[in-house]
Image (tube, rainbow, N blue to C red):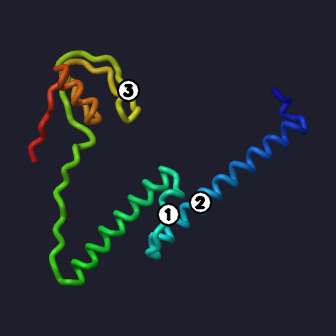
Amino acid sequence: MLDEKSTRARLLLNEHNHVRRLISELIQVRRMKILNGILDGHSIPIEDCTSEEEKMHGTITSIIETYDGILKTVIEGKEIKLKASTEKPKKILVRFIHPLPAIVGIDMKSYGPFKPEDIALLPTENAEALLKQRVVVRVDIEK
């Protein structure tokens, strides 16, 4: 424990801030090098990347390949076919059958407490768990 006003404490804090800035700049330079390499069509040695950089590289490459495919399709005068979304809804509307104390959802937000006949829009994972436990029933909305 150092006195915050001591010279040593101020020097350590200054050094800590300097290291954080250098790390931030290093990460930004690496990110720009990866982005520029992908955009210029150069291959980047994946073995020199961290796992996070590999993931970023793969995601960006996939996006650019998709865009290039769309561009090629449009230039050839063909119709673009959009894929139907197969993603689960992010939230599900449910009606409570049994009382439930407040819960913390998968999104780290607080929900509840609930009484029978209450209606709530809950994250899918939480709603599905409560559906299996027969605490709630799904509310279908007609369009």
Q: Position of residue 108 (x, y in %)?
A: 41, 32
* Residue density around tag 2, few if under 14, some if 14–19, many if 20 or more, within 10 Å: few
Position of 71 relative to 7 (above/below): below
- Residue at numbered disc 3: 104
* Disc 2 residue type (three-letter): Gln
* Disc 1 residue type (three-letter): Pro
Q: Position of residue 27 (x, y in %)?
A: 59, 56
Labels 1 & 2 near each other (Cβ < 8 A): no
Determine whether the residue tagged by mark 2 lies in a helix, strand or loop. Answer: helix
* Disc 3 residue type (three-letter): Val
Q: Nearer the viewer, mark 3 or mark 2?
A: 2
Q: Position of residue 123 (x, y in %)?
A: 29, 35
- Residue at numbered disc 2: 28
Q: 53 or 104, which lies in front?
A: 53
- Residue at numbered disc 1: 45
Residue visible at 86% across and 30% down in the picture: 3
Residue visible at 27% across and 73% down in the picture: 69
Position of 30 relative to 112 (above/below): below
Q: Position of residue 7 (x, y in %)?
A: 90, 39
| Residue farthest along the bottom direction in this orientation | 76
